[in-house]
Image (cartoon, rainbow, N blue to C red):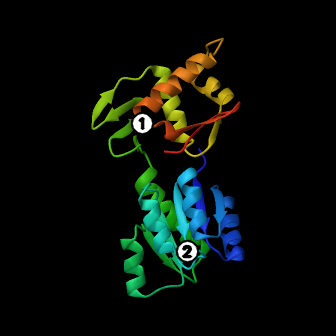
Amino acid sequence: MQKTVTVIEDDKDLNHTIVKYLTMKGYKCKSIYDGKEAIDKLYEEPCEIVILDIKLPSCDGFKVAKEIRSFSDMPIIFLTSLDGQKDIERGFMSGGDDYLTKPFSLKELSLRIEAIYRRIYKNQHFITIDNHYCFDVTNLSLLKDGKEVHLKQKEAKLLMLFLQKRGEIVTKEEIFEKIYEYDKEPSEASLRTFVYKLRSLFSKDKILTIKDVGYRYVG
């Protein structure tokens, strides 16, 4: 699965330079140039790592980080010209995981991103869903407060697919291919039943129906 990075930087030239470099390194990148827009888009479409400038239109980076922390624990790397001790402290206090000051080298930024992936995502066997639920990737099992929640095999596979493609549209065709495997006649009715079961466990707002196409998990 391709690693996803969102670059929130209002300097379009710098934003494009970072995105171009990280794309060459194998990351799937998205550019955002405005603070409020960043909050709205990351709520709807989370990513794995956020690169965040502080001096942004409509809402500064400190506020953006705090808002992100209200709904997600996705790692945040501050990338800013503010290099004072108080600014650095404020960055970490607002929810940042790392703080890189301008000017910087693209190589150093890449190394810091890779370090976060090694620390947080490498060999990850559990995916956190919310304060109560997590998913055991190795055993394809859902846990609530440490206790297993019974799921049918296809329900567990569907949940795993949603978590792997968090924020992305998953088509019905892809779901049928991934969870039905060798079944000759995948059923849309049973798929709706599986989705209903997952919604009943978490929230119907976490799994959005994309009419005539498929679903999108936004939790």
Of badges 1 and 2, the one in the foreground is 1
**Farthest residue in the top direction?**
184
For residue 92, above or below residue 115: below
Front in this rendered view, residue 214 or 11 = 214
**Of residues 54 and 196, the one drawn nearer to the viewer in this rendering:** 196
Residue at the (61%, 44%) spot, across then down: 168
Q: Where 74 sits versus 125, above or below?
A: below
User: On the picture, is 176 further left or further right than 154?
Assistant: right
**x, y percentage for residue 182?**
61, 15
Residue occupied by mark 2: 53
Task: Name the residue that disc number 1 marks.
Answer: 202
Q: Position of residue 146 (x, y in %)?
A: 27, 36
Residue 217 lies in quadrant: top right
* Residue beneath the point at 58% across and 74% down: 58
Mark 2 neighbour class, 10 Å CA radius: few under 14, some 14 to 19, many 20 or more: many
Badge number at residue 106: none
Q: So how many labels did they put on this image?
A: 2
